[in-house]
Image (spheres, helix red, strand yellow):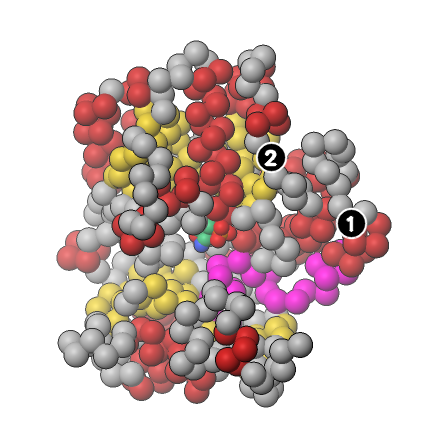
Amino acid sequence: LIAPNDLDAWWLPFTANRSFKQRPRMIARAKGMYYYTPDGREVIDGAAGLWCCNAGHNRDEITAAIQAQAQELDYSPAFQFGHAGGFTLASRLAQLAPGDLNHVFFCNSGSEAVDTALKVALAYWNAKGQGSKTRLIGRERGYHGVGFGGISVGGIVKNRQFFGTLLAGVDHLPHTYNRAEQAFSRGEPEWGAHLADELERIVALHDASTIAAVIVEPMAGSTGVLPPPKGYLKRLREICDKHGILLIFDEVISGFGRLGTAFAAERYGVIPDMITFAKGVNSGTVPMGGVLVREGLYKTFMNGPDHMIELFHGYTYSGHPLACAAALATQDIYRDEKLFERAKALEPVWADAIHSLKELPNVLDIRTIGLVGAIDLASRPDAVGKRAFEAMDRGFQEYGLMMRITGDTIALSPPLIITEEQIGEIVDKLTKVIKAVA
Ligand code: PMP
């Protein structure tokens, strides 16, 4: 047995947290908006865990649902049986999704959801007798998890450079961030819709008959919070329609109220052919992901005699009863507490609060959208550690604030239950910590 204070021994088996050894950041419990350290310090959660605990931490309703489910039906093999929770959840999600996205493939993470969506796209074109449509198009600075599909279409070179050839035939659209044109934006920047036209360039290069799908995060999250320029996603949809290319929205972060609507697709009035989701589906409690698929797409490949996806794709834990029970309880909370509407109503308050940090030292840019915020901090010329990393570490250790960082960017995405007072608390703590790392 490893003693709780023997951090050297803990470090060895659990390798996820690379910066852990220099300075451990340990938490013991969480409730509502707060984490608590083993020595009882309160830390406000500015990141909803990892963009996932949208209903807040340790909700009694979710805990009770998981417990009751475990005592009733602990596991159900998705290939042999159905269970009420799985069907009920699928139909709840279908109702929540825009348009005719009314079929769900469940899996266990955002990465699996992305791989599933890419496979569905390829299966669809095969079923239509257009098996030559195999090229996939992602976007620079896109993040789609760590599976082989996700790193292939993802736009982070560092994430794919060590892993061989990956998927063949992948192109990347340019990312949509331009500080000179979009500095200190609130919501969707005015500049940049024309960047969607780059898709026309790729089509001209490879011909639409070879292109299966485009996958984008409506708002790129993990690479620094890059909201879509006004009109950009509509333009992408139009070009995809014109050339017969599927459009996949990766809503692993933007789903479940983060941008003030159930899915970002609703905010932008754009109906993609598939939506990947995970994280917020059950507020981060039990691993779960999935793909919502349009009716016509689903029917096409399910009707092909050799293209029944059940025969070649699915996971042992797809639609796990505990994950479904947690998700149903979470969806009840979202509905009963109107948390998506709450996020929408709080957006201007949140934007004012985060943008008020504009004059602090080393702040290069601030972006807000929905209940998401990003603060870019200038890196240090001497390169002795990144300023943003130090802010994150000291924020936790000294000021009781948990935030996420990506590169030189502080990313914020609090649980949707946050109050105006707690927004004030986050801003207060941020002010102190950004000054402290000046
Ligand atoms: N897609 C997006 C847009 C994400 O933000 C993430 C995770 N941050 C993933 C996919 C991967 O999800 P997971 O870590 O659950 O595999």
N-terminal of the pair, mark 2 or mark 1, is 1
Tell me, yes or no, if residue 181 can be seen here: yes
Q: State the residue position of label 2.
A: 314
Q: Amino acid at mark 2?
A: Gly
Q: Residue at x 41, y 60 (%)?
A: 372
How many discs mark residues in the rendered view? 2
Q: Is residue 58 magenta?
A: yes
Q: Quadrant of the N terminus?
A: bottom right
Image x and y of residue 405, in percent: 37, 67
- Left or right of 353? Residue 114 is right
Question: Which structural element holds mark 1?
Answer: loop
Q: Is residue 190 magenta?
A: no
Neighbour tally class for label 2: few under 14, some 14-19, many 20 plus, Cα within 10 Å: some
Image x and y of residue 183, in percent: 21, 60
Q: Nearer the viewer, residue 254 or 85?
A: 85
State which region is magenta. 44-65
- Left or right of 188? Residue 413 is right
Image x and y of residue 258, in percent: 48, 54
Q: Residue at x 56, y 61 (%)?
A: 53
Pointer 2 with pointer 1, Cβ within 8 A: no
Q: Residue at x 65, y 41 (%)?
A: 316
Image x and y of residue 58, in percent: 66, 67
Q: Is residue 168 above or below residue 113?
A: above
Q: State the residue position of label 1.
A: 74
- Left or right of 320? Residue 240 is left
Q: Amino acid at mark 1?
A: Asp
Q: Nearer the viewer, residue 268 or 28?
A: 28
Q: Residue at x 49, y 16 (%)?
A: 127
Q: Is residue 191 above or below residue 48?
A: above
Q: CA distance from mark 2 to mark 1?
A: 19 Å
User: Which quadrant of the view contains residue 238?
Assistant: top left
